[in-house]
Amino acid sequence: MAKALIICAAGMSSSLMAKKTTEYLQGQGQDITVEAIGATEGNKVIESAAFDLYLISPQTRMYFKQFADLGERVGRPVVQIPPQAYVPIPTGVAALAKVVTDNL
């Protein structure tokens, strides 16, 4: 099972997106789960390399370089979520699912 993690400002909106995206991916037959945390935990979680992919929400874009550099050090991809893929409606969820599958 592949695991992706959304890193968001507080982890609230990302929790909803993670749940909906996991449901969408599993409904498509993908063995992928998506979880979410707040940005204050980002460095520690990326350093642990516990996830296969780290996704940076639009609200935490200012931390992208810091997180991407850390991801490179531990051999894990860190990608930015485009704003249109961060909307909890079917098209947004499908777009986020594509970001996940394209980067795993």
Image (tube, rainbow, N blue to C red):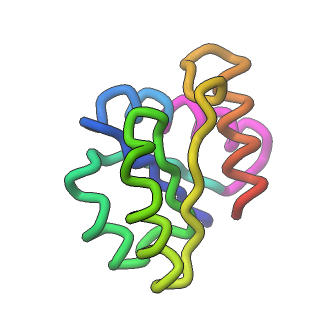
Q: Where is residue 42 in the image (x, y as percent from the top left)?
A: 30, 59
On screen, residue 44 versus residue 34, left or right, reads left
On screen, residue 88 versus residue 11, left or right, reads right
63 and 33: which is toward the camera: 63
> Is 34 part of what is drawn in magenta?
no
Say which residue appears at 68% left-offset and 43% top-offset: 26
70 and 5: which is toward the camera: 70
Magenta residues, start to end = 18-31
Total labels: the figure holds 0
Which quarter of the image is occupied by the N terminus?
bottom right
Q: Position of residue 91 (x, y in %)?
A: 73, 19
Which residue lies most toward the left here? 40
> Is 22 part of what is drawn in magenta?
yes
On screen, residue 50 versus residue 78, left or right, reads left
Say which residue appears at 30% left-offset and 29% top-offset: 12
Say which residue appears at 65% left-offset and 24% top-offset: 84
Snapshot quadrant of residue 83 = top right
Which residue lies most toward the top here? 89
Q: In this view, does 72 lie above or below 10?
A: below
Q: In this view, does 47 lie above or below 89?
A: below
Would you say the magenta stretch is mainly helix, strand or loop? helix
Which quarter of the image is occupied by the C terminus?
bottom right
Snapshot quadrant of residue 98 = top right
Q: Position of residue 72 (x, y in %)?
A: 53, 79
Q: In this view, does 28 lie above or below 2?
A: above
Q: Where is residue 96 in the image (x, y as percent from the top left)?
A: 66, 36
